Image (spheres, rainbow, N blue to C red):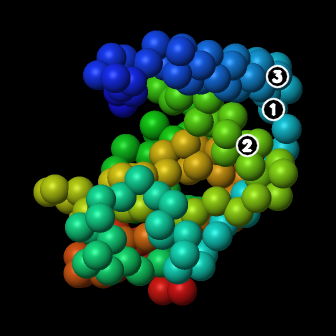
Amino acid sequence: MLYLVSDELNIEVILKERAKLVEEWKIMDELVLAYKSSTPKVNPIWDISSNSINFNDISKEILDSGMEIYTASYDEVWAGIFEPSIYDKDTLWKNVHDSRKIARAIKAWEEKKALSPLFFVKHGSKDLALVADGKHRLTVARYMGCNNIPFMIQSSASSWLKKAIPSAIKI
């Protein structure tokens, strides 16, 4: 983002924003260290309202085509996703994940804030789900022993779901 003042970059604004970002990262890094040394036990809370769909990192085209929210037992979800070992509880603080995103999910649930469901898409050649959005929420939910997992799929591309996660129930 460029800030122009009389056709020149406004360095002061850029430096202030950068300092703010550095401070936010510092706070988050401190939280990561605290959580790594003693990960609090939290209960995952999910926002299954239609409004929650807007808070995911999903393209506007997919959102405009329609979304459906489902829920299933963790075991069924685990069996129906591609390469579930990536999200296993033993990977919580491993380098395969962004520790800041893990900490944000834990902090939100520690503060009793509901997070939006995961977003699944069909694997290209298999009747399995790919976690398109919510990888860190899924990992934290697995670590915390969550019983049921809500997730979203694109309405127009839902035929594969009953093969991947047979017990999925539309909410």
Q: Is residue 60 above or below residue 88?
A: below
Residue 95 location (% of width, % of height): 51, 20
- Amino acid type at mark 2: Ile
Q: Secondary structure at mark 3?
A: helix
The CA distance from mark 3 to mark 1 is 8 Å
Q: Amino acid at mark 3?
A: Ala
Considering the numbered disc 2 on the image, is that residue within a helix, a strand or a loop?
helix
Q: Residues within 10 Å of mark 3 (few under 14, many from 20)?
A: few
Measure the alpha-carbon separation of dots 2 and 3: 12 Å
Instruction: Point out which mark residue 39 bears.
Output: 1
The residue pinned by badge 3 equals 34
Q: Earlier in the sequence, mark 1 or mark 2?
A: 1
Q: Indicate the amino acid at tag 1.
A: Thr
Q: Residues within 10 Å of mark 1 (few under 14, many from 20)?
A: some
- Residue 32 as seen in the image, left or right of residue 77: right
Of tags 3 and 1, which is closer to the observer? 3
In this rendering, is residue 130 above or below 37?
below
Cβ atoms at labels 1 and 2 below 8 Å apart:
yes
Q: Residue at x 59, y 79 (%)?
A: 49
At x 51%, y 29%, the residue is 97
Identify the residue position indicated by label 2 in the image: 106
Q: Examine the image and state in which quarter residue 127 appears.
A: bottom left
Q: Residues within 10 Å of mark 2 (few under 14, many from 20)?
A: many
